[in-house]
Amino acid sequence: MRTSFMAILSLALLAPAAAEAESPAVATLVEAARLIDPRTGHALAPAAVLIENGTVKEVGAPAQVRSHAPAGSRLIALGGATLLPGLIDAHTHLLLDVIVPQEAQVRRMTFNGEFEPGLLLAIAGMTPSARVLLGAQLAREDLESGFTTVRNVGHSGIDGDAALRDAINAGRVPGPRMQASGRKIIASGDYIQSLNPALSAAIAGQEFLFLDGPDSARRAVRANAFYNVDLIKIAVDDNISPAEMSALVEEAHRQQLKVAVHASSARSIQIAIDAGADSIEHGNEVTDEQLQLMRAKGIYFDLTPAFFDGTFWKTVHAMTVLSPEFDARLRGRDQRGREGGAALVQRVLRSGVKFAAGSDMCWYVPGKTRGEASATMFGALRTAGMPPLDILRAVTIHAAEMLGWQDRVGAIETGKLADLVAVAGDPLADISELERVRFVMKGGQVVRNDFAAQ
């Protein structure tokens, strides 16, 4: 009788995909050669995950979990693959896809020549609807590369990322779970300069909210809150006063919104720390003393390693014609990025500060989807000397905590959302495996399964 029961159960688990589409399974059983727990770094081998109603019901050995699977469950057998939690990109710009201009145009611009033209094209050259549709494409590409959750931090128009988030949540378009920040809050003169004065206010107001005193800081938070944002993003580049920063953080926290601060210089980082910000983004010039202060206050450091592997600027200029002088300039910048990234990563690791990682990807990278471009951050962090387990934690459990979603995502654990990815090899031996995600599940729904074709 036991043999007959197991035969019936096996047939049920192996029901054809067509039948699944017609009659959704009560539960899903995902089996793989191993499952890595980012908290411990240990692997469960072999492993099985039972999923019901989009959440993880049980994790364990296949025989044990299979015995608890309801009749009619479907089986997703991933063979020798390694299962991991869905990846989290903690610093995205999904409504921006900057194509760097030719060298002559870069030189012609007096400010931010590689970035400002593409930003202005997005703001003034696209309708808000067209821009959200671009964001939908980039969001889908991120999801297909294994990023099941993202935190979008600006450059999205007035409410573009909030609208995209809502469309994804409603099932109208595919994409990762999103936190939206609305318009980036800045001081006048940041990001864009010297625009036609007859048009500048209208153009800038589509992308940014500006500070001019503590009262305006509070108004900026409320303006974003009107669009139901999930967090507030502010850029502090030695031009925001402590009083303005404190007012902004106080108002955001009053509305239960976290504050992510773009800050690179030691002075701007200190202003953010003193005001009680929730995370420091980039933080290139952070001091050891500031890292210790952040650790004591529980402020997250969000590493953005796009420039850390020493190839970024040459890569995004791959489609342009370069003079020998400009080519040397790009190589020099890439080398400085490699050296600075390695030094920063080692200091962050030594400090014990809580840290996550985000791609900061807003660029068109020739030959790559947005998801593939975002995934280059794994290799960049490894080049900078970060151990693979720390990289994995930075984009799973630690990122989930920074977002305040540790009860939902970041680990394959009972009660959490069934966001899973799988790779062919072992990412703790070779972190580049995360650049080749072959299976993606979000909330129990399969987004991608390259293993099925084998």
Image (cartoon, grey):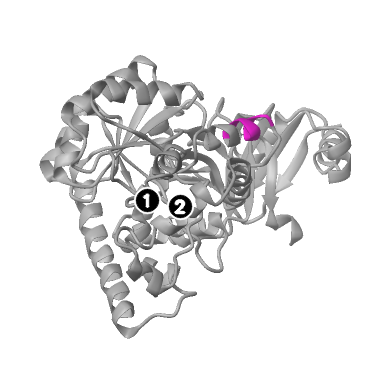
Question: Which label number is shown at residue 195?
Answer: 1
Residue 451 appears in the picture as rendered = yes
- Does the magenta-highlighted stretch encompass residue 168? yes
Q: Position of residue 10 (x, y in %)?
A: 81, 41
- On screen, 329 above or below 33? below
Q: Quadrant of the C terminus?
A: bottom right
> On the image, numbered disc 2 is attached to which residue?
120
The local crowd at label 1, few if under 14, some if 14 to 19, many if 20 or more residues have their Cα within 10 Å, is: few
Regarding mark 2 in the picture, which secondary structure is present there?
helix
What residue sits 53% from the left and 59% below the top? 372
Number of numbered discs on residues = 2
Q: Which segment is the magenta one? A: 165-170
For badge 1, the amino acid type reads: Leu
Give the alpha-carbon distance from disc 1 to disc 2, as whole Å.
10 Å
Q: Quadrant of the N terminus?
A: top right
**Badges 1 and 2: C-beta atoms under 8 Å apart?**
yes
Q: Nearer the viewer, mark 1 or mark 2?
A: 1
Which sits earlier in the primary sequence, circle 1 or circle 2?
Answer: 2
Residue located farthest toward the left when viewing the structure as drawn = 289
- Does the magenta-highlighted stretch encompass residue 368? no
